[in-house]
Structure formats: C-alpha cells, structure tokens
Amino acid sequence: MATWQFVADMVTATPTVLLDINSASTGLWVGDGYNLSPTGFDKGRVGNSMRHGQRIVRSSAQNQILNIPLQVNATTNQTASTTIQTLGMLLRVDGILKYQASGATNPVFFRTFADPEYAIEVTKTLVQNAKLNLQIECEPFAYSPRVEVTGSPFTLSNDPAAGSNGMFIDIASVVGDVETPLFLIATSTGATNGLLSKWTHVATRRRGTPSSYSNVVQGEAMTLGTNAVVTADAAMSGGSKLRITPGTATHVIRANDTFPANGTSTIEARGEYIVYARLAKTVAGDTWTAQLKYGVDSTAPVANDTVTLPAAVAGPFWVNLGKIPVPPWSDPANHGFSGIPLKVLMPWVGFYAGRTAGSGSLDFDCLYFMPADESTVITKWPATDTTYVLDGTSAEGGSVYAATTALDEVITTASPAQIVGGGGFPELIPGQTNRVHVIRQVDPAGTTDGITNTTTLRAYYWPRWREPFRT
C-alpha cells in the first residue's frame, strides 16, 4: 500500500507523522487515479519580423497541483470527525506531504502551500463515508531526504596548487532530475582554520569537465616583464613567486601569459571570471598599484581598472583585479547549427604593477580566475568563533548565518553574517561534475591568509524531482 502522510519535516526518510491519509487507524483512504504529474512551464517569448519564430527568454516551472482521491471510512463518527478536523488544520498552513509508492525504496516529499479557504471547504464536505478529490497546491518539485555529498567533509587547502583540494571541491553523482541548491557548513573553527572575520568568495562551474583546465596561472611560469625575477618562497603557491623591484615608479607590465596557462583552447574555459592576484609587499607602508589587461596581445589590450593595494598591510593577500570575458571578443559558442561547442582561449593576459611611494618590492604569487557567469556569492563572516552556514535553500534565494554544530539553533553574533557581493547561491546539476570554487579570504582591506591554512566544509543537498516516480 502506498504511503501518504503529512509529516513534520524531511530531514530523514522517517520523520514524525502528523496525519496518515491512507491508513485504517485514521479512517482515510487514497483511491486509485491519483495524479502527481508535473505541471508545465511559464514561458516568455519574444519575436519580430526580422526572424522566423520566437525566442524563449523565460522558462520557469509552475506550481504543481496534487490530485488525490480521498475517502473517509473510519471505525466511528468520532474518529472521522477528529481526522477531518486534523486534515483541515494541515491544509490551512504550509506543510510537507510524504509519498512513497508501494514497493518503492525511497519516499519523496512535497512542500505544500497553505489554503485556508479550501481547508474550510474540505472540512465541510468530508463526513463519514464521503469521497473527495483532494487538490493541494505545492512547489513544482518533490524532494528526497537530505544527502551529504560523497567525500564530505572536505578539507580545502588555501594553496591553489594543492591538487584535488586546492581551493575547490568537485561534486558528482548528484541525485534528482533538476538542479538543487547547495547547503554548505563550515565546521572548522579558529582564526587559522575557520571562517571567522573572513570575506569568502564561493562560485561554481557546472559544465563540461572542470578538470580539463586549471583556473590558476602561476607567476613563476609566466613570461617575465620589467624588473620581475623568479624567487623561491615556501609561503607562496607552488613554492615560488615573482619579486618585482622597480627601478622607477612606472606602472608597467611585470608578467604575461595565456588563459588557460598552457595555451590550449578548451570548451570549459568559456565564461566570465573575476580575476584575483595573490600579492605581498616587502614594506607594508609602500604604495603600489596593480592592474590586469587582456586581449590578443600587448599592443592594444583591454585594461581593467587600476587598483591601489591596501595600505600598511604587507600580505600576502588576494586582490580583486576585475572581471574578464573568455574569449575576449565575439563568441558564437557553437559551430553553427551543429550544437558542438567551440573551444576558447584568452590569448594574452598581462599583470601590470607600479610603486608610487616607498622603497620596497612587490611579490607576485599567482592569478586565480574565479567563475563569475554562474552562481557566485561573497560573504562577510562575523568575528565569532562558531559554525557558519551558507544556505541556498531559504525562501529569500539563499542566506548566510551562524548556527550551533547540530544546526538546531541560529546563533546571534555581535554582527551578522552579510552577503557583500555576487549574484546567486551555488546550485548542483544532476549528471554533471559540479566544481565549487572557494577563496576564503578576499577582504579588500588585504588581510593575510597563509597557504598552509585549511577550511573544513560539509556539503549537503536535498535531491529535487520533477518526475518523482523516477526515484
């Protein structure tokens, strides 16, 4: 017999049952002919006389209507009355309906919407031995219980050259048939291995094979420019850096390369990126400027804004050098009507720097190309040593907050966690390797964060189903 139950939550497959609507104990029965088919999509189309057909510019799933044939067949009128009143109460508020087909291994959950007027109608209509086609509006997708990602908890290195844990995590084998928000928990604590007082940038790349290219360009592997010398340094990514000791205060090119750094075009490199440079000053009080330029070559490149490095901070620290597109010019994306993606490459990327005051040198470690064309969010965490949550599941489209380790209580800190940048929370796509990039300290004030530090992250999601029968 299929399971139909209003439940208290969907943390596990066996939550507390509020009302069983297919059970002899309650006297409610679900008949044949129920319909859980998904509804259509709300689409927006635009067109004009200059082209055939129309383009779809918006497509979002509509809410689902669950049609459930229900019959009251309780042992007594009193049982029937109690059950009907309980059902009415549950229809008056947002709720969760658990469904598990007969013989199915796993249940799914529908997040239902309150309908007080309909609840009154149901309680008036249903009596002992009565039948009713129950209609409940719910979210477009059904959910499976929460899943912890394979490999979680992840220990992320602060060193982008650290291989499989170098400032990213890969999430594959995502269950479900539609994308679903990511739920990240920073379980580590302390100034070295926690997130307290950090400005953390999280972004995703969810197409192709992310491992087919690298987001890092190491300074020591670049073509050297004016007054730049490769120097060994264990505090820098890859164990080396470029030391820039200018003979003059001129703001000139110090190093250049391609992106990806090996000069090989890939499908995966396509997109927009926020480029961070890891820099350090030998004299904290010196005034330095840095800039990124890009294009075909150095002859007439596109120039991003010049950035003045944080004052009175030596580093090393990450500096935001602005956004770039790859490729730099027109991009048809596919080979004609074939649907075959074209490979792309940024032919030339140049790092410029100049010292306008002081006498010291500038150490240039590497460039990190942070994806910026999908979900990306920058969070400023409080200075409280606790557990932090980056939650893409909330009704606001995502939120960040402090919580207990058990996640059963939100903690009020002296200052709240804040979203200070970005355009959306990470979501996971089934059937795709989802790479989640994390730079944990991008504070524009230039706070130092060593490459030997690590961050422990637990990653969860709730599988979402447009077609719940596929579970």
Image: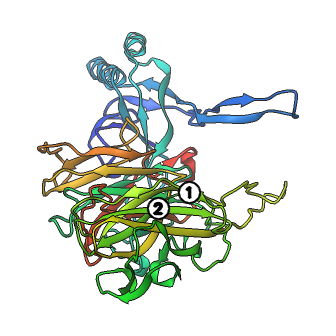
Q: Is residue 53 left or right of residue 43?
A: right
How far across and how far down the image is residue 207, in percent? 60, 61
Picture residue at 34% right of the left edge, 68% below the top: 152
How far across and how far down the image is residue 471, in percent? 52, 54
For this rendering, which residue is in front, 430 or 133?
430
SS category of the residue bearing label 2:
strand
Q: Are marks 1 and 2 in contact (CB under 8 Å)?
A: yes
Q: Quadrant of residue 281?
A: bottom left
How far across and how far down the image is residue 174, in percent? 49, 61
Crowdedness near tag 1: few (<14), some (14–19) or many (≥20) residues, C-alpha within 10 Å: some
Crowdedness near tag 2: few (<14), some (14–19) or many (≥20) residues, C-alpha within 10 Å: many
SS category of the residue bearing label 1:
strand
Q: Is residue 163 above or below residue 149?
A: below
Which residue of the protein is positioned furthest toward the bottom in this rendering?
232
For this rendering, which residue is in front, 441 or 205?
441
For this rendering, which residue is in front, 25 or 407?
407
Give the residue pinned by disc 2. Answer: 291
How far across and how far down the image is residue 93, in percent? 33, 24
For this rendering, which residue is in front, 358 or 162?
358
Q: Quadrant of residue 161?
A: bottom left
Q: CA distance from mark 1 to mark 2?
A: 8 Å
Of pointers 1 and 2, the one earlier in the residue sequence? 2
Amino acid type at circle 2 is Gln
Amino acid type at circle 1 is Ala
Q: Is residue 346 above or below residue 339?
A: below
Give the residue pinned by disc 1. Answer: 303
Residue 259: tell me if it is visible.
no
